[in-house]
Amino acid sequence: MKAITLLLAAAGLALPALAQTEYHFSPVNQANIATAASYWNPIVAYVSEKSGVKLSLKLGRTSADTTAYVLAQEVEFAFTNHLFSPEREQMGWKVFGRRNTPPLHGQIVVAADSPVKSLAQLDGKEIGFPGPEAFVAYKTTYAQLLQQKVNVRAVFGGNMDGAFAQLFSGKVAAVGANSQLVEGYTKREGKQFRVLWSSEPYHDLALMVSPKVPARDAQAVAKAFIGMAQDPQGREILASGAKLVGLPADAVFVASDGHEYASYRRFYQSAPATLR
């Protein structure tokens, strides 16, 4: 399926982008495409207007597809945690912000009424994951299963909502998940989970910019994202989006220089080669 590309540029109100260049923004689509687009459309429109830098939202069918755009250098801005492996850090992308949500945990979960009560009981079963690029939901959880010598068959649902649907339809026995998205799905869909294992904490995804974006444009976009928290219009957009996806009502974007992502880098130092 071709990428869903939504053009959301608005007339510039601040410093105009150089030659009115249009950039693509690809956030990892953790929910289904419709929900992800509904969350990000107003945010990207706001950032385009306030920064004077034209942005378009580019979402793939799956989170792995969206990350593929980044790796192929088809986008210039991203909201992701897929770029902290040693090889990908060489691409030169820089963190300029993050969402101030509580720490994330990789979790292995089952339905609340499942008879499964330990990881050992998952041996030989099919386990759902959003996709092979999902750091918190797949890489940390699958690494734990490998460490515990629990042999499972991975089934990828395309995104977290897809994996949860597989769990509650009975297709998989458990799901490797992101704790934030477990909580959000419970709020949105009323489904209850039992947590079998939880990882160390990780910060939420990072707002990142490609090294090919001129500093002037990168700074204008960063200022607009971070400024949403101080602007009534921006806060209203963020609060509405948070309600849609099940985030805390006060979830906003804050500045970051990337140091908060040290735990991601530590993971790759000892992770199995297949997960790097």
Image (spheres, helix red, strand yellow):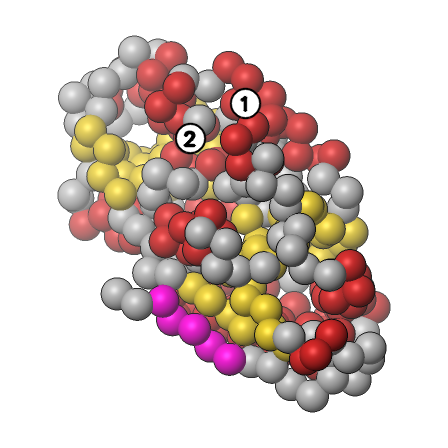
Q: Considering the numbered disc 2 on the image, is that residue within a helix, a strand or a loop? A: helix
Quarter of the image with the N terminus is bottom left
Please give left or right for residue 255 compared with residue 37 in the image.
right
The residue singled out by tag 2 in the image is 139
Quarter of the image with the C terminus is top left
* Above/below status of 37 relative to 210: below
Q: Are marks 1 and 2 in contact (CB under 8 Å)?
A: yes
In the picture as drawn, the residue positioned furthest to the bottom comes out as: 11
Circle number at residue 148: none
Residue numbers of the magenta segment: 3-7
Q: Considering the numbered disc 1 on the image, is that residue within a helix, a strand or a loop? A: helix
Quarter-of-image position of residue 50 = bottom right
Query: The residue under label 2 is which amino acid type?
Result: Lys
The residue singled out by tag 1 in the image is 267
Residue at image position (64%, 42%) is: 92
Query: The residue under label 1 is which amino acid type?
Result: Phe
